Amino acid sequence: MPALLMLVAALGVCCSCCGVALLLRRLRGCCCRLRTLMARTEKPFFRIAYGLYTRTRLGYLFYKRQLKKARERYPQGHSSTQAIVFSGVKVVPIPVLSDNYSYLVIDTTSNLAVAVDPSDPIAVQNYLDREGVSLEAILCTHKHWDHSGGNKALKKLHKSCRVYGHSCDDIPELTHPLSDRDQLAVGRLQFQAFFTPGHTVGHMIYVLDGKSGDGPDCLFSGDLLFLAGCGRMFEGSADTMLASLDTVASLSDSTLLWPGHEYAADNLMFAAVVEPNNAPREKKFQWVVQQRLEKRCTCPSTLGEEKEYNPFLRTHSRDLHVALDLQRGADEEWSRYRSRVLEEVRRRKDLFKGR
């Protein structure tokens, strides 16, 4: 998505179209404010494109175009997935767009379902029909169209459906604004929401209590955390993102990680660059390579695994500090040093293969 957005922005700047020029003029102040929040390595065209994508109808039209192209290219989805079933609970990954995942979490006793980040409403509705369940709620991690784009269409079909998210993000069709550590229930499904800004100002993650189905907790992390990676700091500082990642790190090691994108292979290749002697990373990479050769989903991992090889969860690790050639200042606070480590890892990842 970033490369395409940069192209859209570049075309917009060069184009003589009055509408695009007017949009750019109106966004000039917005982009200046975002400049201080976004990662230092982002190029000016990307910052403009980001403003267009998140704050104008042009972003929605771009999302619709990408949705159409993905449906044509991947009529069965970009990856094959497999549901996981606990006692009375079923988690169904849904491959959408070119590398996103939405999820259905189903209370199999009542046949009530929750959709997480349903960006393709047709795909999600097909899965609802296939499972024979009723959509009771949408849990939206953040405002980006590739996570929230299906809210309106699904809300139209399921009028009593509740839409959850943080009010700081402009979540489409939001009905139930959430705050940090709020709890919500659908049937026997018990969730807790955590406020995790950094990728966006209102990003949230959702943890399904394992007691809902006599299984492990399940983390639906949106764009905060991926297998071996994390989201870009579009609207937050390294300090903010570190606090959000520490929220994740405080959860049980047995927690299953269900991320918003299939980025595992790329992330693990990058992890090898910043921490080349990490044996757990190499073992995981070999497994991921085989999965992706067969176009299989790499979700879920566990947070225990992630803490072993995900560099964004290892800012405390001396091995990573040595690999990055970073040293703590004599009077530097530990949290400030870890933020500096995170910022360096994120900077290098932003430059790695352009993502």
Image: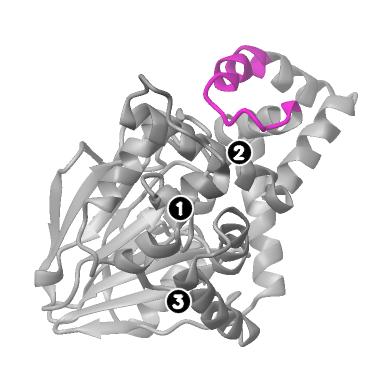
User: Judging from the image, what secondary structure is the residue with disc 2 in?
Assistant: helix
Question: Which badge, 1 or 2, is on the more N-terminal residue?
Answer: 1
Please give the label number shown on residue 319.
1
Near-viewer residue (143 or 277):
277
Badge 3 crowding class, 10 Å Cα cut-off, few under 14, some 14 to 19, many 20 or more, is few
Label 2 crowd bin: few (<14), some (14–19), many (20+), radius 10 Å: some
Asked if residue 97 lies left or right of residue 152, the reply is right
- Kindly identify the residue that appears in the image at 41 percent across and 56 percent down: 117
| Residue corresponding to mark 3 | 126
* Magenta-colored span: 26-44
Instruction: Residue at 35%, 19% (x, y): give it.
Output: 331
Label 1 or label 3, whichever comes before in sequence order: 3
Say if residue 27 shows up in the picture. yes
Question: Left or right: 321 with respect to 7?
Answer: left
Q: CA distance from mark 1 to mark 2?
A: 18 Å
At horizontal 44% and vertical 69% (from top left) the residue drawn is 124
Compared to residue 71, the image places residue 320 above or below, namely above
Whether label 1 touches label 2, CB < 8 Å: no
Amino acid at dot 2: Arg
Q: Are marks 3 and 2 in contact (CB under 8 Å)?
A: no
Observer-side mark, 3 or 2, equals: 2
Indicate the position of residue 234 as horizontal and vertical percent values.
53, 34
Q: Quadrant of residue 292?
A: bottom right
Which element carries disc 1, helix, strand or loop?
helix
Residue type, numbered disc 1: Asp
- Which quadrant of the structure image shows residue 173? top left
Label 1: how many residues lie within 10 Å, few (<14), some (14-19) or many (20+)?
A: some
> In the rendering, which numbered label is found on residue 347?
2
List x then y, in percent, for residue 137. 26, 58
Q: Amino acid at mark 3?
A: Asn
Q: What separation in Å lies between label 3 and label 2 (alpha carbons)?
A: 39 Å
Q: Is residue 187 left or right of residue 177?
A: left
